[in-house]
Image: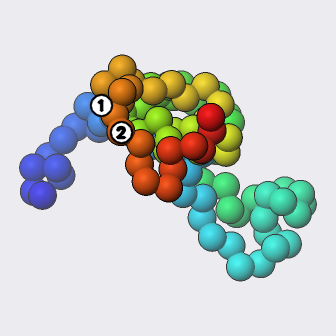
Amino acid sequence: MEEAGEILESHVLIAIDHRQLRPKVNNYNLTIEKGDGFELNRSLFERLVLKGFPHQTLTAQRMRPEISAFLRTLTYPNLTDAPKTQGCANVRGLGAFGQ
C-alpha cells in the first residue's frame, strides 16, 4: 500500500466506467431525474466525460456471452465478446438469454 502513495500523478490511469456506481441520493428533488439542475446522483467520472474529458470505453469483454447479452440490453449496446469466451458450455439458467 505504501508504494501506491509514491506514484506520480502523471502516471495514474483511471480505469473506471462512468456509467456505473452513481452516488445514492435520498432526496428526489436533488437527482438527475427531477431535472432541477442539482444532479447530485451523477458521479464525478460521468461529469468529466460529459464535459469532454478524454476517455475510452472498452467494447470487448472477457465475460460469458450469456452475461454480456444481458448487459447489451441495459447499458452497453456495442459490447462484443472476446474470442476466448466463445464455445463454452452455457451457464445453467442463462443459456437462452439474448438469443
Q: Which residue is labeled 2 in the image? A: 89
- Residue 96 image offset from top left, x and y in percent: 57, 43
Earlier residue among tags 1 and 2: 1
- Residue 80 image offset from top left, x and y in percent: 51, 25
Q: Nearer the viewer, mark 1 or mark 2?
A: 2
Q: Residue furthest bottom?
A: 26
- Residue 48 image offset from top left, x and y in percent: 59, 39
Q: In this picture, is 35 found above or below 64?
A: below
Quarter of the rendering occupied by the N terminus: bottom left
Q: Is residue 29 left or right of residue 59?
A: right
Q: Judge by depth and name the residue closer to the eye, 30 or 78.
A: 78
Q: Is residue 75 left or right of residue 34?
A: left
Q: In this picture, is 3 found above or below 68?
A: below
Tell me the residue at 63%/70% (across/down): 24
Q: Which quarter of the figure has residue 64?
A: top left
Q: Amino acid at mark 2?
A: Ala
Q: Judge by depth and name the residue closer to the eye, 91 or 7.
A: 91
Crowdedness near tag 1: few (<14), some (14–19) or many (≥20) residues, C-alpha within 10 Å: few
Q: Amino acid at mark 1?
A: Ser
Circle 1: element type? helix
Tell me the residue at 60%/44% (across/down): 97
Q: Which residue is labeled 1 in the image? A: 10
